[in-house]
Amino acid sequence: MTAVLERLSLSTAAARTLATTTKTAPQMQEITSRWLLRMLPWVETKGGVYRVNRRLSYVVGDGRVTFLNDGAAVRVVPRELTELPALRGFDDDGVLATLAGSFRQQEFAPGEQLAREGQPADRVVLVAHGKARCTKAGAYGDPVTLGVLGDGEFFGADLLLGDSAPWDATITAQTACTVLTLHRDDLNRLDGALDAVRRHAARLTADRNRPQNRHGEKEIALAAGHEGEPALPGTFVDYEAEPREYELSVAQTVLRVHSRVADLYNDPMDQVEHQLKLTVHALRERQEHELVNNRDFGLLHNADLRQRIHTRTGPPTPDDLDDLLSRRRRTRYLLAHPRAIAAFGRECTARGVYPSTVDVDGQPLTGWRGVPMLPCDKIPVTDTGCTSIIAMRTGADDQGVVGLRQTGLPDEYEPGLNVRFMGIDGRGIISYLVSTYHSAAVLVPDALGVLDSVEVGR
């Protein structure tokens, strides 16, 4: 029979009951660097509303068209045809339905041409799905890339105005493309509908022919290079009659702490303070998410459609970022998902190009052309492995992107964030209302640009 050996020393399990521990404050995996909140200039927004006044602009029809599909069959939403320049503001639903029903679906394989430069422009083409490259012959005969068309974009819309000019570029499918086309012959059969469209287009042409600069803003009459004493032109700067207003949005939660915890478990760490600290971190994370993704004021949805471009081949290449940077002056930051930054690094390595390193607040970050790429995991990555890269000029002095908040709130805990005591209920639970107020504004359209269709998984 085996003898039971008597323990000669205290077990570790028993010893832990008498020992003190060295502990950390509560940790939280959700916390990120939140570069957008750190780098965005914040404007004090008294009254909770920020109005952006701009010069009067005559720009018409710069949108994208929306489609519906029944299986493989695709059709255009009739009201979405008002995104075409000739139909902007057109309100005859019957005519729009007739036009929408006249489009025919076509499929193009990669490499097939949707249109050839110099041939008659005899149809309106809406790109329902896929990407197509626009090229034309350069000064020395080589093809020059003008851009990439993606989902919802279109070409040939001047046909609705009666324009018979030939195609000024060659459109080639880069991926499998589904398009809807309205041929000139089908359009001419719609006598009543076509007459209504042409009358509406004639009214719009009056706006398009008004003196304006290359951005579509009302021209300021000037004289330069004259001699003698000619009569100088008189002018004034007209403003938009209905400027956009941004209201501060809110993110809130109610923090609950039992009074027993607040009374008995505050040594050596204040339980309420650490509960509040982690709650504030969660609200700040949500705030940054809203600044990127909110459909009203988020950067991804606030970018002017003329400032949205597509990648040429899928992954983010140096050429794509050059196209993005060239659309605005003084781009301060590029905002990208970490996977997009890694994909850009792979493309640079494949080409033997080395992106620069830019110091931002003492931290080295990947940069391109001296512009730092700020990592932001709030930019979504789709199931197909596509994301976007945001370029922005910041600051009110540079007519850029600004963050909006109001400080000096009652019971303010941090700038633009307050914590208000809500009382103790019958179960002894203490409640605090934690709120943060925020928004973002784009002062002029070219302050913000987006590179879409960025593949990160190739």
Image (cartoon, rainbow, N blue to C red):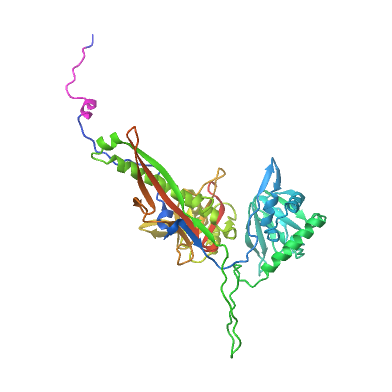
Residue 347 shown left or right of residue 60 in the figure: left
Observer-nearest of 107 and 426? 426
Residue at the farthest top position? 1
Q: Position of residue 200 (x, y in %)?
A: 73, 62
Viewer can see residue 31: no
Residue 236 appears in which quarter of the rendering? bottom right
Q: Residue at x 67, y 68 (%)?
A: 208
Observer-nearest of 212 and 9? 212
Please say if 328 is above or below 114: below
Residue 331: say if magenta. Answer: no
Residue 137 shown left or right of residue 315 in the figure: right
Quadrant location, the N terminus: top left
Residue 359 appears in which quarter of the rendering? bottom left
Residue 406 appears in which quarter of the rendering? bottom left
Please say if 47 is above or below 220: above
Viewer can see residue 62: yes
Residue 401 shown left or right of residue 238 in the figure: left
Numbered label tally: 0
Q: Position of residue 279 (x, y in %)?
A: 37, 43
Residue 130 shown left or right of residue 24 in the figure: right
Residue at the farthest bottom position? 228
Question: Which range is magenta?
Answer: 3-17
Q: Position of residue 73 (x, y in %)?
A: 71, 43
Residue 11: say if magenta. Answer: yes
Q: Position of residue 308 (x, y in %)?
A: 57, 57
Instruction: Name the dominant secondary structure of the magenta segment.
Output: loop
